[in-house]
């Protein structure tokens, strides 16, 4: 089977880092054309640096990393150091990256790459705020038909919000960008908190990462150990949700996940419910379905896949 061509748009973030590693550990399934960094969990200067750290950890200093938008389309940036730490990759001690950042802006990389690729041939995997993706679609609408699918981490419905009572962080940070993407007509697969909150990184699962015995295993165990403390305290759960790797695992083994094709729209007007993903799960409107909204996963299968693949790096 020909590997699926993807671009990962990211705001590392410990869970972003694990998603990138999973993709780079799966070359038979996924060809990563490039990584575009966006401001989100931490400011852009850190997310682009963190993306390069993760690429070097995976032995992929050859992979082009681009810096994108340093703020949402029309709102001030909101960050999440309280979850990810000041660096965005708190947990282990990390050295600065040596690989260079690409000079081109991430939005130009997205436009140039999609412009030259055949129709419906590239999958976009945004795992942070959707600012870069929306900016590229606004700059060059002709690239939209080149996108095979957008598989994104974001939103929430039955699980409600994590940054406000109504909204999940990625969508909350740039709701106008999300609105552009959700109305673009591109086939959407959404990994909301409804499913990621069932993908809890428990102590035995962290130990399984550590037992891999490699630097990758050590780093992922240290990142997930750090990342876990916030959600465990907040939700009292036996572990933190490992959000972003759900997108990559879906590309590798979609039958681990289940959901429903429904209409999902984004609240951009109200400050109270800004960034809410209004998911018509029960079909009570006549709004056209625009997204595969994923609600469940085989968590054991997910962690088995993740651990096996990380051991390959
Ligand atoms: O709400 C979870 C999402 O916000 C994840 O992508 C996490 O990395 C942060 O970006
Ligand atoms: Ca993220």
Image (cartoon, rainbow, N blue to C red):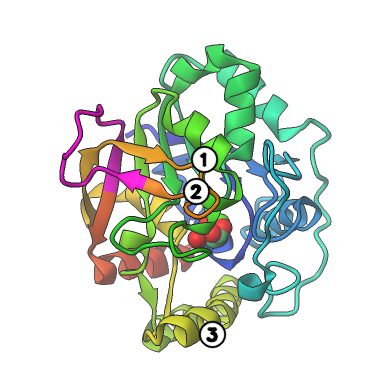
Q: Is residue 283 magenta?
A: yes
Kind of element beneath mark 1: loop
Asked if 158 appears above or below 100 in the picture, the reply is below
Residues in magenta? 278-293
Q: Which secondary structure is most common in the magenta stretch? A: loop
Q: Nearer the viewer, residue 95 or 156?
A: 156
Frontmost of labels 3 and 2 is: 2
Q: Nearer the viewer, residue 42 or 158?
A: 158
Residue at numbered disc 2: 275
Q: Quadrant of residue 238?
A: bottom left
Quadrant for ligand 2?
A: bottom right
Q: Is residue 306 magenta?
A: no
* Count of numbered marks: 3
How far apart marks 3 and 1 lie (CA) works out to 31 Å
Q: Nearer the viewer, residue 64 or 79?
A: 79
Residue at numbered disc 1: 268
């Amino acid at each position: 089977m020909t590997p699926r061509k993807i671009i990962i748009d990211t705001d590392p973030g410990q869970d972003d880092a694990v998603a990138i590693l999973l993709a780079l550990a799966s070359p038979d399934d996924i060809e990563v054309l490039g990584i575009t960094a966006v401001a989100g969990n931490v400011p852009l200067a850190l997310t682009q640096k963190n993306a390069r750290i993760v690429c070097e950890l995976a032995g992929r200093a050859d992979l082009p990393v681009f810096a994108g938008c340093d703020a949402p389309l029309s709102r001030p940036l909101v960050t999440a150091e309280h979850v990810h730490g000041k660096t965005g990759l708190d947990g282990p001690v990390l050295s600065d990256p040596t690989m260079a950042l690409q000079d081109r802006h991430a939005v130009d990389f997205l436009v140039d790459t999609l412009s030259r690729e055949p129709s419906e041939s590239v999958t976009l995997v945004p795992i942070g705020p959707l600012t870069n993706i929306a900016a590229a679609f606004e700059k060059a609408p002709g690239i939209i038909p080149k996108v095979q699918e957008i598989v994104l981490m974001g939103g929430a419905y039955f699980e409600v919000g994590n940054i406000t009572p109504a909204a999940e962080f990625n969508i909350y940070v740039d709701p106008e960008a999300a609105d552009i993407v959700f109305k673009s007509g591109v086939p959407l697969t959404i990994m909301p908190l409804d499913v990621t909150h069932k993908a809890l990184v428990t102590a035995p699962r962290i130990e399984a990462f550590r037992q891999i015995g490699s630097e990758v295993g050590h780093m992922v165990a240290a990142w997930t150990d750090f990342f876990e403390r916030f959600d465990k305290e907040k939700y009292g759960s036996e572990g933190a949700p490992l959000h972003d790797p759900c997108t990559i695992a879906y590309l590798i083994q979609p039958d681990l996940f289940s959901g429903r094709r429904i209409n999902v729209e984004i609240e951009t007007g109200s400050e109270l419910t800004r960034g809410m993903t209004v998911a018509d799960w029960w079909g009570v409107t006549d709004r056209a379905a625009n997204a595969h909204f994923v609600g469940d996963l085989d968590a054991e299968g997910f962690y088995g896949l993740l651990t096996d693949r990380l051991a390959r790096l």
